[in-house]
Each structure stands twice: as structure tokens, then as C-alpha cells.
Amino acid sequence: MELINSDIYCNRLVRLLLHYLDDKELISNEQLILIKKKIKNIKEGVDNHVPTDQEIQQTLSMLSDKVKVVYQMYLVSGIRKTEGSYLLANIHNLKTQQYDGFVKVTMNYLRNTKNSYFCYLPTDVYEQLKANNLKSIESLNYELKTKNLIPIKYCRKWFYTKCIELGIPDTIADYYQGRTANSVGSNHYLSRQMLADKNYSKMTNYLNVFSP
């Protein structure tokens, strides 16, 4: 760490690496912030921007109906881009549990250190996704890029921030986003799952007011 803080070339290399990891969603916001605190002058090259509700609403208002619900899927679940693609491609085959106002989709999408066991979605968003029948996010990516709108990766940051604002514990926000450690004991994991089931209604209640 001393070398990174004293050598300009090492410092720049770390900035570039962090920028790459952030862009590819290979590092969490918490890890970015932790590293940022330890490395001097690390602000440049690290994107910690969290879009406002107004920015998100503007993006939603400018998307076509066909892709808007896919963007909402990312916005209200906090899942990663690749996990959203997996959900779209397999939505008719994945098991769900019905709750009051939302569904819990069993993902069990595991790869390396990135795991997604469940995806929480408001019932109306889930039903629209099933009826939409889009199998990829290419159309959404195209509209976001051509219309210069908020990219998908910011949906994950917005979701986490909104969870904290709504009083959802950070450990449960992590759970929604698939950051549950593999070493967590089964009893502790089940308690998180129950708390996640209990707390997601806070998000659905907020979305009823938030949706443009």
C-alpha cells in the first residue's frame, strides 16, 4: 500500500484496475469504498455515482414499453446484468414463491464467487416479464446507449442505496444482491432469507409511489 501511495505509476495502474472491475461489475461498492479510503488520490477513475430518483424516472419515461420492464427488473431486484439475462432466458422454467405484492424467483445461478440464489420482484413486474417474452437485454442496451440514458449497472447501485434509505439492513440488501458468503452457516442463512422475505415489502410499497 505504501508503494501505491508513493509511486504515481502504481497509483494510476490501481485506478485503471478499479475502473475496469467496477465497469465489469466484478467488485462491490463496499469494496471500492474500502480501497478508496486506503489509497490516496483514488477518486479519479472510480465511478461511485448513484443516480437520483429523478434521473431514474427520466430514464424510464424515455424507454419504449418493450424494454422498460426489463430495466425495471434490474432496478427493483438489484441483480447483476448477467443474472438478469439468465432470468429472462429461463423465466418460464424457474420456480417461484408467491407473497403479498411480490414473488421470489428461485435462481440457483452459481458461477465462481458470484452467486444468485433468489431474485425478488414485484408481482406486476414479474408478470410483465413473462408476457413480454424478451430473451435478451440487447434491445435495452441499445436504447440506453443511443438515448444516452442511465446504464444498467447503476440500477444495482440505486437499489442498494434505496434499501438502506428504506430501513432495510445492509446485510439483507447484500442478500438481495447475491453477496451472501459461502461460509455462512445454514441457520444464519435461513434467518437472512426470512428477513429478506419480510423486508422486501418496503421496496414494493415505495415503488408504488415512485413509479412514473
Image (cartoon, rainbow, N blue to C red):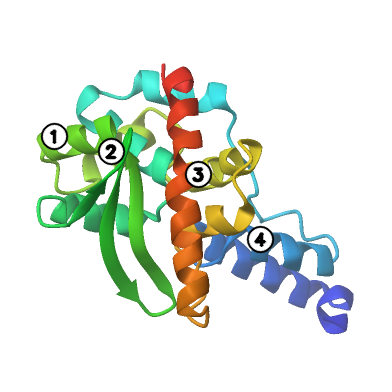
Query: In x, y percent, where is residue 108?
Result: 28, 68
Q: Amino acid at mark 2?
A: Val
Label annotation for residue 70: 2
Of residues 211 and 188, the one drawn nearer to the viewer in this rendering: 188
The residue under the point 16% across, 51% down is 91
> Mark 4 = which residue?
30
Q: Amino acid at mark 4?
A: Glu
Badge 2 crowding class, 10 Å Cα cut-off, few under 14, some 14 to 19, many 20 or more, is many
Label annotation for residue 199: 3
> Mark 1 = which residue?
132
Query: In x, y percent, where is residue 4?
Result: 81, 78
Disc 1 or disc 3, which is closer to the eye? 3
Looking at the rendered image, the quarter that the C terminus falls into is: top left
Which quadrant of the figure has residue 109?
Answer: bottom left
The residue under the point 34% across, 58% down is 118
Of residues 83 and 189, the one drawn nearer to the viewer in this rendering: 189
Determine the secondary structure under disc 3.
Answer: helix
